Amino acid sequence: MKAVILDEFGGAENLRLQEVEDPEPGAGEVLVRMRATSVNPIDWKIRSGATKGRIDVELPAILGRDLSGEVERAGEGVVGFAKGQRVMGLANGTYAQLATAKADVLAPIPDALSFEQAAALPLVTLTGAQLIERAVKIEPAQTVLILGALGGVGRTAVHVALQHGAKVIAGVRESQMAEAQALGAHQVVAVDDQKELEKLHDLDAVADTVGGTVAARALKILKPGGVFGSVLGAPKDAGKYNVRVAPLMSRPDASRLYELAEDVARGSFIIPIAKTLPLEQIREAHQEAERGQAHGKIVLVIS
């Protein structure tokens, strides 16, 4: 099969498409013929070497977390997966024509979604849902500020918090205020305007997807005993505040992924796709994603 191989950490030029041996599904695994995947920040951070010591990867490696494709073959002990069945999931090594995954992480792709649409969902939707449900542990009528509400993780967090009956404040840059109105949050605030951010106070929770100085400032607007959930770890000086910091590392959850994919299929919320490229253009995809100027996911089509 063809796969994108990373032999050494560094720039996108270190990603090479080459022929490698086909993987074999082990016990409890499914071999999937990949049709699409997508680029996530964790992909280019691992590639660059920025995650060393936190997320260590043995080289040579095949990157990629989002799986979207068709069942090729089931491994020993696996039932309920037919050849050709459309599946999606949060897996590893998905920058390839074939990938293996544990059967229990795979969910059916809703009929209304294409492989490309499905490929944009697993990591960001599960991370957004788990940020609200596992880290923040939101309760009805609580008020939560979601930082980075227009990103894939943030959009999902807004959607899930609303499902749980929370009062949701969407935190975005001032230039994004108009676009953010469509998220359905109760309030939209420009978090890059310190004065606007400081008008908020005594919040029950903050769900952080951006980090940096904005996240540090948001600590100050939590009520005593409030919760700061983050996919990027605790801000500097978080220990000075009487709040619970809840870092999150997302994990596979097939049933929750299917529910979220069904919500997307119904139009309850969207994960925008900025660009679709063939896997052969992996370097371009990483470069564009790393620049941070794409308004949506970059999806890779695999043939």
Image (cartoon, rainbow, N blue to C red):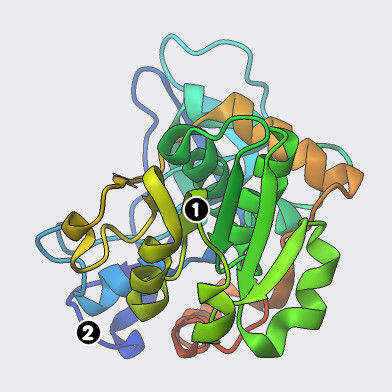
Q: Is residue 235 above or below residue 281?
A: above
Instruction: Give the quarter of the image for residue 236.
Output: bottom left
Q: At 66% across and 64% down in the image, what residue appears?
A: 170
Sequence order check, earlier mark of 1 and 2: 2
Q: Which residue is mark 2?
A: 10
- Furthest residue to the left? 53
Q: Is residue 74 above or below residue 97?
A: above
* Numbered disc total: 2
* Element at label 2: loop
Res 64 visible: yes
Q: Which residue is mark 1?
A: 202
Q: Position of residue 212 (x, y in %)?
A: 34, 77
Whether pointer 1 and pointer 2 mark residues with C-beta atoms closer than 8 Å, the reply is: no
- Mark 2 burial class by Cα count in 10 Å: few <14, some 14-19, many 20+: some
Quadrant in which the C terminus appears: bottom right
Q: Position of residue 116 (x, y in %)?
A: 72, 59
Instruction: Give the quarter of the image for residue 148.
Output: bottom right
Q: Is residue 133 above or below residue 2?
A: above
Res 298 visible: no
**Left or right of 249: which side holds 85?**
right
**Left or right of 22: which side holds 166?**
right
- Mark 1 burial class by Cα count in 10 Å: few <14, some 14-19, many 20+: few
Q: At 48% across and 54% down in the image, what residue appears?
A: 206
The residue type indicated by label 2 comes to Gly
The residue type indicated by label 1 comes to Asp
| Depth check, front residue: 186 or 291 | 186
* Element at label 1: loop
Q: Residue 27's mark?
A: none
- Front: mark 1 or 2: 1
Q: Position of residue 55 (x, y in %)?
A: 20, 56
